Image (tube, coloured by chain):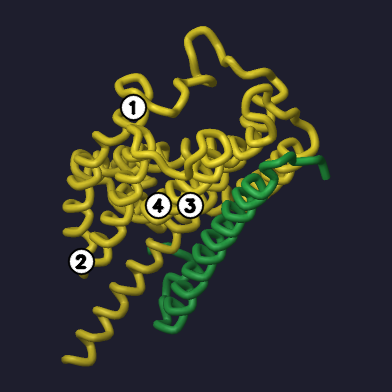
Amino acid sequence: MIELGQHAQFIIWAYVGVFAGLLALVSWTLLDARRTQRRLEALGDPRRDGKS
Amino acid sequence: MSIETSPKQSWWNRLAHPGQFVIWTRPFILPLAILTAVLLALGVWFAFFNSPADYQMGDTVRIMYVHVPTAWLSQFVYATMAVSALGTLVWRHPMADVSMKAAAPLGAAFTAMALFTGALWGRPTWGTFWEWDGRMTSTLVMLFIYLGIVALWRAFDDQLRAARVVAIFTLVGAVNIPIIKFSVDWWSTLHQPSSVFRADGPTMPGSILTPLFIMFFAFTFLFATLQLLAMHTEVKRRRVMTLERRAARGEAA
């Protein structure tokens, strides 16, 4: 790891914040997709593969 | 001699079919996700281990590698929504409002990240987390517009009616894009003018441009991946609503 100088805390918090945000965004997108797919299956969709 | 009676469908018409859209675009998701992960890992490695401190900003230049891509996406996602809004109002393309709806929360998240990283860069560089200058204020306005659009989608049960209202609201809000872009030229501001996309070429050295461009593409591919996934989910959600209405009618009868 390189020396980040006197402003290391700002740099580290910027990356921690962005990657926490990205993780939340990806998790929310995947959870929403899974929840919707389960609901579709529970309703017994005859066209499960999106062939609407 | 046989006569072709069925009309020929263009790719544009085929993409208008939600099911066809899902089938055709699904194979792109995994390669896009892998490309995003590789570029993000490479970008972080360059940002921390293979790029120098800037002669003016010092090590805080490393914040630029996450700030510039998120700030770019805050405007690019809105431009995507504005084009989709035109698709809804002018061409009535069935996937246009799906695209608009999927992009709004993503744009809000990237805008929030741009404001957050900008504040963390501003404190050591300008001595303040926040200043009411043209670019920062117009970007904050953009975040509120995104949040308003997300709320507007949720306010309607009828998603087709919501699409028309949101499309008009989105196109009105698009006036904020040139304001953000040219705010540094129009008003006295702490922000520096454009330093990458200039007629006379970038003013940054290659050692800083390399991680910047890697992160730029990593974040752009991430948006493309999440946008496709969210669009597929929205298509399925509408199918769920159709099935639920059908079931309710069946029960009522």
Q: Which residue has dot 1 on it?
A: B183
Q: Please count the marks in the image.
A: 4
Q: Check disc 4: other Cα within 10 Å, few if <14, some if 14-19, many if 20+.
A: many
Is B102 drawn above or below residue B194 in the view shown? Answer: below
**Which of the chains is green?**
A
- Using the numbered discs, state the Cα–Cα distance from disc 4 to disc 1 in whole angstroms: 20 Å
Q: Which residue has dot 3 on it?
A: B228
Q: Earlier in the sequence, mark 2 or mark 4?
A: 4
Badge number at residue B156: 2
What residue is at 47 percent from the left and 21 percent from the top? B194
The part of the image, by quadrant, that contains residue B55 is top right
Badge number at residue B108: 4
Mark in front: 4 vs 3: 4
Residue B31 visible to an observer of this rendering: no
**The one of B63 and B158 positioned closer to us in this rendering:** B63
In the image: residue B176, left or right of residue A19: left
Whether residues under marks 4 and 1 lie with C-beta atoms below 8 angstroms apart, the answer is: no
Whether residues under marks 2 and 3 lie with C-beta atoms below 8 angstroms apart, the answer is: no
Q: Are marks 2 and 1 on the same chain?
A: yes
Expressed as whole percent of the image width and height from the top left, the position of residue B77 reads 41, 42
